[in-house]
Amino acid sequence: MKMNVEIKEGLEGIIACKTSISRVDIEDGKAVLEYRGYNIHDLARYSTYEETAYLLLFGELPTKKELKAFEEELKDLRDLPAQIIGLLTHLPPFTHPMVVLRTAISYLGSMDKEKHFMDYEHSIQKAKSLIAKIPTIIAYFHRIRTGQNLVHPNPDLGHAENFLYMLKGEVPDRIEARALDVDLILHADHELNASTFAARIAASTLADMYACVVAATGTLMGPLHGGAAQKVIEMLREIAVPWRAEEYVLKKLERKERIMGFGHRIYRNVMDPRTIELRNLAKKLAKMKDSKWFEIAEEVAKAVYKHKGLLPNVDFYSACVYACLGIPDDLFIPIFAMGRIAGWTAHIIEQYVNNRLIRPRALYIGEKGKKYIPLRERG
Ligand code: ACO
């Protein structure tokens, strides 16, 4: 291969596929994010996670009747097979919940005798099952590792509300349930982010849906992607009081360290539309719960902008939202996955329907044509 080929490190700006699932654009200096043509702000204001998941999977907003049927199907699919509960019981309690989730999804795949059917109907069925079961996996593992009795899914409750109920053992109030619902809507899809790309690469080999979701789950966990949300709350805990924020930021920047929850490959100088919504949510919840996290976060955001010109990303204020909801720090990334599963599965299906193997090239920069020396002569 010629040495003068242009390499886009990190594939920045490369258009790798066509999609009709979500659109990220910068228009008139403002960022736009749409799912299937619907603006994220409208969805956050008027929709539910179930409605949004339906939209992502089927391409259209549901009618009342379609939504009711979809919600009922999800409720029917929430229970976990006994083997998965056994797995959750046997995993060491110190296992990171993202590793638990990845392992449980893989196990679910091993139990699905139809996992290799990739036609549309089977794929949609698997997607619904994963959307419904992921909250149960997360909540059950947390109850098990903390020695509490399992709280089984409650069919009277919606998706977000039921998750908080299974996690904490109490039906959450309406504001808390709606806050998580909106958070899940905002996390449901985001074009060709790293974990979705990982899922699509796996799908392009015609790997089964569970394998694709395992690839996505592993990719989401990294701190430069979804893992940042957990790092944000760890940072806010370390700062502890608003007046220490600027000093903390300056020290980090001096050491050339990254400040988690800031920067984005696409939203360089414009605010991520999800961040706008999440900041509003975090502010409202902090007031309601008399929590200090929002105030500290605001000081961090001011300092990072002042000294590095970077804006907060989706993980920054979502960390404040989860902390205000009393969610343990290491469940922040699994909750991201709980929202993103709708987008991942929609992308996997889109890849299956119009597939071509994703196989880019690399420019080789190592040594060439070396003479092989047998082991006995190498000393
Ligand atoms: N803290 C400090 N400096 C940063 C940060 C940050 N969080 N993000 C970017 N920069 C700086 C880089 O050091 C670089 O500065 P320089 O030009 O002075 O060398 C410049 O901004 C450009 O950075 P890149 O690395 O080119 O940006 P890239 O698009 O590759 O990275 C990323 C994007 C990974 C999100 C980056 O901003 C980052 O590491 N952020 C922190 C982790 C994080 O919050 N991830 C979540 C992203 S949202 C999501 O995935 C859900």
Image (tube, rainbow, N blue to C red):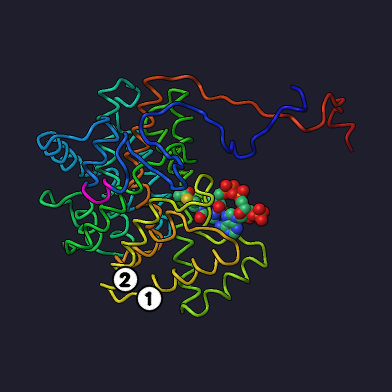
Q: Main secondary structure of the magenta part?
A: helix
| Res 309 → quadrant | bottom right
Q: Pointer 2: what residue?
A: 286
Q: Is mark 1 within 8 Å of ligand 1?
A: no
Residue at 63 percent across and 71 percent down: it is 251
Is the residue 28 above or below the residue 363 in the image?
A: below
Q: Which mark is residue 292?
A: 1
Question: Observer-nearest residue: 107 or 341?
Answer: 341
Circle 1: is it few (<14), some (14-19), or many (20+) Cα within 10 Å? some
* Residue 219, placed above or below residue 263: above
Marks 2 & 1, CB-CB < 8 Å contact = yes
In the rendered image, residue 235 lying in the magenta stretch gets the answer no
Q: Quadrant of the N terminus?
A: top right
Q: Which residues are magenta?
A: 42-46
**Does residue 107 sit above or below 159 in this rendering?**
above
Residue 164 percent across, percent down from the top left: 23, 58
